[in-house]
Structures are given as C-alpha cells and as structure tokens.
Image (spheres, rainbow, N blue to C red):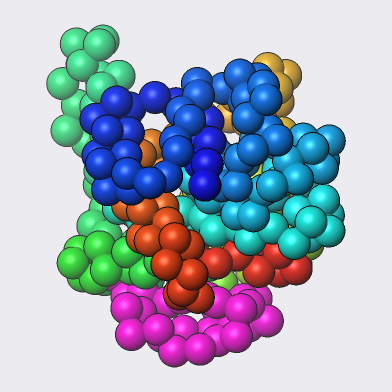
Amino acid sequence: MQVVATVGRNEALEKRIQSEFPTVQFTFLKKMKEIGENRYTAEILVTYGEDLDEKLINEMKNLRWIMVMSAGIEKLPLDAIKKNHIIVTNARGIHKIPMAEFVFGYILQYAKQLPLFKKQQSEKVWNRKVHLQEIYGKTMLVVGAGAIGSQISRYGKTFGMHTIGINRSGKENPDFDATYSLEQLNHILPEADYVISVLPNTVSTNKIFSRQQFFKMKKEAVIINIGRGNAVDEQALMEALEEGQLAHAFLDVFEKEPLPADHPFWKSDKVTITPHLSAISDMYLPRAYEIFVKNLWNYVNKENNWINLVDLNRGY
C-alpha cells in the first residue's frame, strides 16, 4: 500500500505518521510534478486538490482514495474521480478556529476604528472625536452554519451578540440563537448588523448575494466573505457600497484570484481586502494530518467509518 503526499514537507509530522503505520509505504513530495512513476503505484493521494487533472487521475489506475487537505473540492476533476470510483475525504472543520478569529479581527477593527487610529498615529494627530461602536447586542447573521459558522457564532455569543445561522435545510443548530433555511435568507437579512458568508463554491450558492440581497440589508450593515468568491456578485456589491446601501465589505475571497489590479475594490474606502488567507495558521497542517491519520486507520482496517467523506454530487 503506497501513500503519495504533495502538500509540502514537514519532517516531524512525516516521521510520526510513518512510525504509526510501519507497513505502509509513504512518498512525500514537494509538488505533484515530482510524482513520476509513483502515479502507477499510489493507492492513496494526499493533496490540496489544486494539482490534479483528468489526465493524471486516469493514469493513476491503482488510486482508491484522495485526501484533500482543505475544505474546498471545486478544483478537483470530479467527473474523472467519479468515473474511477475514487473515495474523496477533506479537511473540513480544521479551519474553524483561525477563520473565526479572522472574522472577529475584521469586526473589531471596524467597530473600534483601529485603521483610523493607525493613520492618526502616522500623522501625529491626537483626535478623540472618533465614532466608536460596541458589538455587544448587535445581530450577526452567518450564512453557512457548519463547523466554521458555529465557531464564529460561539465567539459572537462571548461578545454578547445575537447570532442567527443559515443552513441548507434550516435544521436547528444549538450554537445559534436561531437557525433558518437558505430559502429564508432574504427575510432575515434586514435584521443583521454583520453578515458573514462561509458558503462553499456550488451551483446553488453562485451569486447568492446580489443586488436584491444588498438592498435588503441595513445601510449600516457590514458584509464579510471568507467562504468562496462566487457567492458574491462583485459588481452589485460595488454599486451597493457606492450608493450607500451598506456600510462596508471585508473580503478574503473573490471571483477571480489574485484580484485583478484594475478591480474597483482596490480603490474603495468601503472595502477591506485580504488575499484569501483567513484559514492560514501554524496549526493547519497538524490538524489536517490528524484527520488523515484517523481515516488511514479506517482504510487500513477496512472499516467504513470515514471522517469528512465528500458527496461528489453535492460538492461538499
């Protein structure tokens, strides 16, 4: 049994895994380009999912399982994977702590005007007439009430916020004060002070935030997108911000990445841009490998007890 990993090298993690599975052959590569003849013998592939194509999948005749060390699988050659009956698992859930912390970094810098104070410091300006807000008592709407959204809600409650979750079915989630279905989004939007999108990239989530949704939000509302860029109609968002229909947008993900240099977001005072890194943490790889190790025990022992088994038809 051979495992090929192309997620970057971490010798300490590699040695630990090899010691736990002495009968498994491990090949750790920096990049998929180095796979060479291993493509014909690998039974298990550990990857971020961005380095695979249909041709390679069809060449890997022995491949039975792909462990994607991220949550998104939209860049996988799904048709070829389904055709070859390959199991896919992902690292869903490991991002919840860094991404929830990132959201509150956004919220607190907005409510407490921290960038303004940094600017005043650089200009040696002593100005105490700055409008500061509390987030206590504010309403947070999290669209995508899964593991990440639940962590965001828990942090929100710590700050005394009222939290509302949106998921596909509207099934109750105890981490939220209230939960609604995606179909009820437009009905709930007017209540929110902060709207956070943690949606995956699927057909059903494409441009779910467009002009109609922005104009239902409070003019004082802030939208935050840390999910996938396809969820937000960027032109409609820019128009809504320019027309004063909402106060600010914090965006970590975009329809096209890197964000083109001529995109109007770059020049807008009402947009804060970060380069798709809200999930980055020094704990990322250890947490992802922890899921992989549990699933490898499952695979080796021929048990059907997968963690984060991906439904390839749904896309998550």
The answer, for residue 136, to whether it is visible in the render is: no
Q: Position of residue 232 (x, y in %)?
A: 68, 51
The relative height of residue 254 versus residue 122 in the rendered view (above or below) is below
Q: Position of residue 24 (x, y in %)?
A: 42, 45
> Which region shows up in magenta?
161-188
Tally of numbered discs: 0
- The quarter holding residue 282 reads top left
Viewer-nearest residue: 42 or 97? 42
The answer, for residue 86, to whether it is visible in the render is: yes
Say left or right for 28 vs 94.
Answer: right
- Residue at the spot x=24%, y=30% of the render? 12
In the image, farthest residue toward the top: 123
- Residue at the spot x=46%, y=54% of the render? 91
The relative height of residue 31 versus residue 22 in the rendered view (above or below) is above
Viewer-nearest residue: 274 or 25? 25
Q: Position of residue 13 (x, y in %)?
A: 28, 35
Say left or right for 237 vs 131.
Answer: right
- Residue at the spot x=70%, y=35% of the render? 40
- The quarter holding residue 245 reads bottom right
In the image, farthest residue toward the front: 23
Say left or right for 249 vs 206.
Answer: left
- The quarter holding residue 164 reads bottom left
Q: Position of residue 262 (x, y in %)?
A: 72, 19
> In which quadrant of the rendered image does the C terminus lie?
bottom right
Viewer-nearest residue: 51 or 214? 51
Viewer-nearest residue: 45 or 259? 45
Is 183 contained in the magenta span? yes
Is 135 contained in the magenta span? no
- Residue at the spot x=56%, y=72% of the render? 189
